[in-house]
Amino acid sequence: MITPVNRSPPERGEEESLAIRVRGLRNSFGEQVVHENLDIDVRRGEIVGVVGGSGTGKSVLMRAILNLRRPQAGSIEVLGVNALSEDRQARLAVERNTGVLYQNGALFSSLTVAENVAVPLLEHHKQLPPDLVADLAILKIRLSGLPDNAAGKTPSQLSGGMRKRAALARALALDPPLLFLDEPTAGLDPIGAAAFDELIRTLQQSLGLTVFLITHDLDTLYTICDRVAVIADRRVLINAPLAEVEKFDHPWVQEYFHGPRGRAAQGAKATHSAQENV
């Protein structure tokens, strides 16, 4: 039996250092159990990459943390707030302090980019004057790396990479300290994916963000993630720096990180590090 390893159990007095704390989570769909007794911690100010095979419930975990679905058991705290609370103020506190980039962007097709970015502002800050909302939307669009002229375009007028950035701009609309990214580089070419990774790391460092990142992209894991959480066998097997995860004795972990693509990602990371040190 493999014992799960979580390298970030909080010591006494360190609870406030956690952005996310999940304990004993159970998610099921009828008789199909996706998660059983799942634990995970995410420290404030770090990027945690969440990986696992298809069907292991990575997005289900994210949705449970965001209270978009109710788990059958367990507790979830987000920025010190009970994320499963029925209290409206608690739910609003979580909503206002989290930004989400969904896998396919989930932009409103009939709205322009600027209007999409303005949606969270109008929902949570109805008192803001229209001119200020417009200015804030432009600011977030620029932060995401899009040109100003993208503001007036609809999602259908954008490339796949630009739609990702527009969705990121909307996720940043409320200046959240906690950002959730679901497969942010999926569908992007290698150059576009690398640029998006660099953007995420830059924003995380400059804005002090905590990032919960679901990905299959090994380059992303090796380039920007501080720790990696592996979901398998219905739980988080290990949540630790990548060097430790690579050594974890589990068939899926070994195949994933030491197969051809894993070795290629390791080589690319080593080359990049060597170039930075020149």
Image: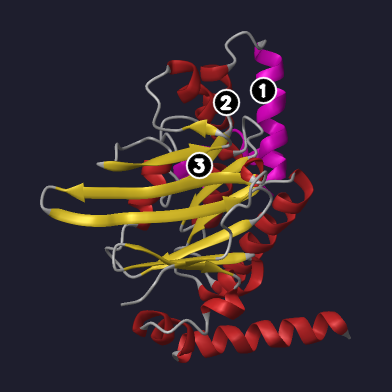
Residue 235: x and y in percent read 35, 62
Quarter of the image where one finds residue 124: top right
Q: Which segment did they paint magenta?
A: 130-159
Residue 237: x and y in percent read 41, 69
Residue 174: x and y in percent read 62, 29
Q: Which of 176 and 19 lies nearest the eye of the viewer?
A: 19
- What's the CA distance linking mark 1 and mark 3? 20 Å
Q: Are marks 1 and 2 in contact (CB under 8 Å)?
A: yes
- What's the CA distance linking mark 1 and mark 2? 7 Å
The quarter of the picture where the N terminus appears is bottom left
Q: Which of 210 and 175 lies nearest the eye of the viewer?
A: 210
Magenta highlight: main SS:
helix
Q: Which residue is mark 2?
A: 118
Mark 2 crowd level (few <14, some 14–19, many ≥20, 10 Å Cα)? many
Q: Which of 88 and 136 lies nearest the eye of the viewer?
A: 88
Residue 158 is a magenta residue: yes
Residue under the image location 29 percent in, 36 percent down: 70
Residue 82 appears anywhere in the view: yes
Q: In the rendered view, would you say 201 is above or below 136?
A: below
Q: Which residue is mark 1?
A: 134
Residue under the image location 50 percent in, 46 percent down: 21
Residue 259: x and y in percent read 44, 90
Q: Nearer the viewer, mark 2 or mark 3?
A: 3
Q: Earlier in the sequence, mark 1 or mark 2?
A: 2
Query: In screen coordinates, is 82 left or right of 145?
Result: left
Kind of residue indicated by mark 1: Ala
Mark 1 crowd level (few <14, some 14–19, many ≥20, 10 Å Cα)? some
Q: Are marks 2 and 3 in contact (CB under 8 Å)?
A: no
Residue under the image location 38 percent in, 82 percent down: 250
Q: Earlier in the sequence, mark 1 or mark 3?
A: 3
Q: Nearer the viewer, mark 1 or mark 3?
A: 3
